[in-house]
Image: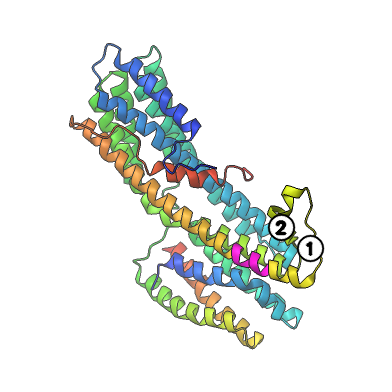
């Protein structure tokens, strides 16, 4: 399979194309909106979508972690205590709120892009009201967002909606910039917690996989598929010595994969943080009426999408 | 020294990574029960802290984190060598107890 490291997923391309189209409709309208603002709206839409996918992947990881703890009850007879189960469920609920917040930002960015559409002001109001509720629902003590930061985000949302309703591009950009800066700071503060959630998943899953391997509870014959598939033969390893060799090999691969899971999440988290920062800086340029030269979404988003897609096929 | 979260991670993840061999080394049900109790406590301390805000600058948290850091080094060595299982469980109990104190302090701050 050909792999293009900077290839943009189809769904993402569609999102970008839709935003560009909407932006064009907007800029063809009566209000004076620059190309920079159009590009910023498109890029913000793509960034917010990646942030939504990042949180969605974390949500899946937490759901899997919950199940892995259940598996340990059967495999090791280790009790899965109710308070821990509740804390994992609560953490999952908080991650889902962040996912909703990122989705709200995507909606607002889209409203910003289609400012002159007949329902744009109404859409912006609805998006902003939703976003405000989502900011309000976050638990600041638990998740490190101070009440000042939370208020700052709410003020920014208010500024955005008023500016969009009044078709004031710079003011809307200023509000979005303020919101994006707060969101970037918020994400950075919680990044280590996000990575820790992923590490926990990698450690438990690899520990259980190795235990099953060591106790002869897996069928390692799949390693010979590559040899036998072309001839329509099905592998069946009966030799104990050969099984032992394969199990040892599989153990090494489990360790490598567990490390790769942690490394890829760290890299995706770093890249998400960089993308949010870049977006915040670019929108600030629009707000300050300075030229924004970069016309494509942050390239680091591709890595975030790649990591998030690894978890899209697991349980929701 | 790492952060409070990182130290609690180390305790819990070290136990999680070696839980199979540790349980297999237990010779009595009492030892298995003691080990699973410590494991559950380490996991609980870890999740309590993921779920709460951290205040790493608090002096009491810094002192406990330093203590846990040193204990974690011993724990890693003990589970890797896996000599006398009774001594290993005692070692685990000591580390998990410090971890539980740290988690309680972090949550209370």
The one of A219 and A58 positioned closer to us in this rendering: A219
Q: Chain of mark 1?
A: A
The one of A29 and A215 positioned closer to us in this rendering: A215
Element carrying mark 2: helix
Q: Residues within 10 Å of mark 2 (few under 14, many from 20)?
A: some
Question: Could you tell me which quadrant the N terminus of chain A lies in?
Answer: top right
Magenta-highlighted residues: A247-253
Q: Is residue A48 magenta?
A: no
Q: Is residue A248 magenta?
A: yes
Q: Position of residue B41 (x, y in %)?
A: 59, 69
Q: Position of residue A108 (x, y in %)?
A: 39, 28
Which residue is pictured at 69% across the width and 58% down the height? A223
> Which residue matches tag 1?
A237
Which sits earlier in the primary sequence, circle 2 or circle 1? 2
**Does the rendering let one see residue A131?**
no
**Does the rendering let one see residue A7?**
yes
Question: Could you tell me which quadrant the C terminus of chain A lies in?
Answer: top right
User: Are the residues flagged by discs 2 and 1 in contact, CB closer than 8 Å?
Assistant: yes
Q: Position of residue A185 (x, y in %)?
A: 33, 48
Quarter of the image for residue B40 reads bottom right
Q: Chain of mark 2?
A: A
> Which residue matches tag 2?
A224
């Amino acid at each position: 399979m050909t792999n293009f490291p900077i290839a943009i997923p189809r769904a993402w391309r569609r999102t970008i194309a839709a935003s560009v189209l909407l932006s064009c409709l907007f800029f063809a309208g009566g209000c004076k909106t620059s190309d920079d603002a159009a590009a910023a709206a498109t890029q913000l839409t793509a960034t917010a979508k990646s942030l939504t996918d990042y949180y969605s992947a974390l949500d899946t990881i937490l759901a899997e972690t919950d199940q892995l703890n259940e598996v340990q009850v059967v495999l090791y007879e280790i009790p899965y205590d109710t308070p821990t189960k509740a804390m994992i469920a609560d953490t999952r609920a908080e991650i889902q709120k962040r996912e909703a917040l990122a989705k709200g930002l995507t909606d607002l960015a889209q409203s910003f892009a289609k400012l002159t559409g007949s329902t744009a002001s109404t859409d912006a109001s609805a998006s902003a009201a939703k976003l405000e509720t989502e900011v309000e629902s976050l638990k600041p003590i638990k998740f490190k967002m101070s009440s000042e930061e939370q208020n700052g985000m709410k003020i920014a949302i208010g500024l955005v909606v008023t500016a969009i309703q009044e078709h004031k591009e710079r003011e809307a950009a200023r509000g979005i910039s303020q919101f994006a800066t707060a969101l970037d700071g918020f994400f950075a503060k919680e990044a280590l917690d996000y990575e820790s959630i992923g590490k926990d998943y990698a450690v438990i899953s690899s520990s259980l996989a190795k235990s099953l391997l060591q106790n002869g509870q897996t069928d390692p014959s799949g390693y010979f598929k590559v040899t036998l598939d072309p001839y329509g033969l099905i592998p069946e390893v009966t030799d104990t010595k050969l099984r032992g060799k394969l199990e040892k090999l599989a153990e090494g691969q489990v360790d490598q994969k567990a490390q790769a899971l942690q490394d890829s999440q760290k890299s995706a988290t770093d890249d998400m943080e960089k993308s949010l920062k870049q977006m915040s800086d670019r929108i600030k340029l629009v707000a300050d009426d300075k030229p924004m030269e970069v016309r494509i979404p942050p390239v680091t988003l591709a890595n975030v999408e790649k990591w998030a897609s690894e978890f899209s096929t697991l349980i929701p | 020294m790492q952060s409070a979260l990182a130290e609690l991670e180390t305790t819990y993840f070290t136990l999680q990574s070696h839980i199979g061999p540790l349980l297999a080394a237990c010779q009595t049900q009492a030892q298995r029960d003691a080990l699973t109790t410590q494991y559950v406590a380490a996991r609980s301390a870890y999740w309590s802290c993921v779920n709460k805000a951290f205040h790493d600058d608090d002096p009491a948290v810094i002192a406990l984190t330093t203590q846990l850091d040193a204990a974690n080094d011993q724990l890693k060595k003990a589970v890797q060598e896996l000599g006398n299982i009774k001594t290993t469980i005692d070692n685990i109990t000591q580390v998990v107890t410090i971890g539980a104190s740290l988690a309680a302090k972090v949550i209370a701050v």
